Image: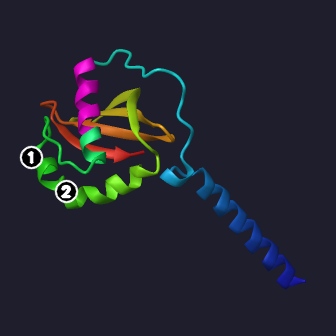
């Protein structure tokens, strides 16, 4: 009887972990692309263009050439971008960025977007320093 209780507990734990994994964002379980047009309310269009150009370059495996910090520029080598390119490939062709929100963290501005692709979407965050240079880029 004790073995049956342990087995039932293990099955419950596995089901919980599988459900949590199914809800995790990855290109393999990507959410469908929203049908709404991109929204950039209260956000400078030049900033959206900067982020979109940067994102397009990065997912194409090209080192960014825009307003990025020297540390970020040095880190964005073609070989370092291969995993990023592979990660986003299953989402299809990049269409646009949809603005979600903006916040600050210390000396940095954080801009949250939904990157819309033909086969899904992915939450991403762009981080700028006080000078406005792109200092970070992350999946959320």
Work out whether residue 113 or residue 57 is closer to the camera in this orientation and state it.
57
Tag 2 secondary structure: helix
Judged from this view, the residue extending furthest toward the top is 42
Residue at 21% of width from left, 61% of height from top?
A: 79
* Residue situated furthest left in the rendering: 70
* Residue 71 or residue 77, whichever sits in front: 77
Chosen colour scheme: rainbow
Which corner quadrant holds the C terminus?
top left
**Residue placed at 19% from the left, 38% from the top?**
134
Residue nearest the observer in this picture, 101 or 113: 113
Disc 1 residue crowd, few under 14, some 14–19, many 20+, Cα 10 Å:
few
Is 61 displayed left or right of 124 in the figure? left
Above or below residue 70? Residue 80 is below
Indicate left or right for 118 with 125 as reference: right
Separation of disc 2 and disc 1 at Cα? 16 Å
Q: Which residues are magenta?
A: 45-55
Indicate the secondary structure of the residue bearing disc 1.
Answer: helix
Residue that mark 2 sits on: 78
Give the residue pinned by disc 1.
70
Q: Whole-percent x and y of residue 102?
A: 35, 28
């Amino acid at each position: 009887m004790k073995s049956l209780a342990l087995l039932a507990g293990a099955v419950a734990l596995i089901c919980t972990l599988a459900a949590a994994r199914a809800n995790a964002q990855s290109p393999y379980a990507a959410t469908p692309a929203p049908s709404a047009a991109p929204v950039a309310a209260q956000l400078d269009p030049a900033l959206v263009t900067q982020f979109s150009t940067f994102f397009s370059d990065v997912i194409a495996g090209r080192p960014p050439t825009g307003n990025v910090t020297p540390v970020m520029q040095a880190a964005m080598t073609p070989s370092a971008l291969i995993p990023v390119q592979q990660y986003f490939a299953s989402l299809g062709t990049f269409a646009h960025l949809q603005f979600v929100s903006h916040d600050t963290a210390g000396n940095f501005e954080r801009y949250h977007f939904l990157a819309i692709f033909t086969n899904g979407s992915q939450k991403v965050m762009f981080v700028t320093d006080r000078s406005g240079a792109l200092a970070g880029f992350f999946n959320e």
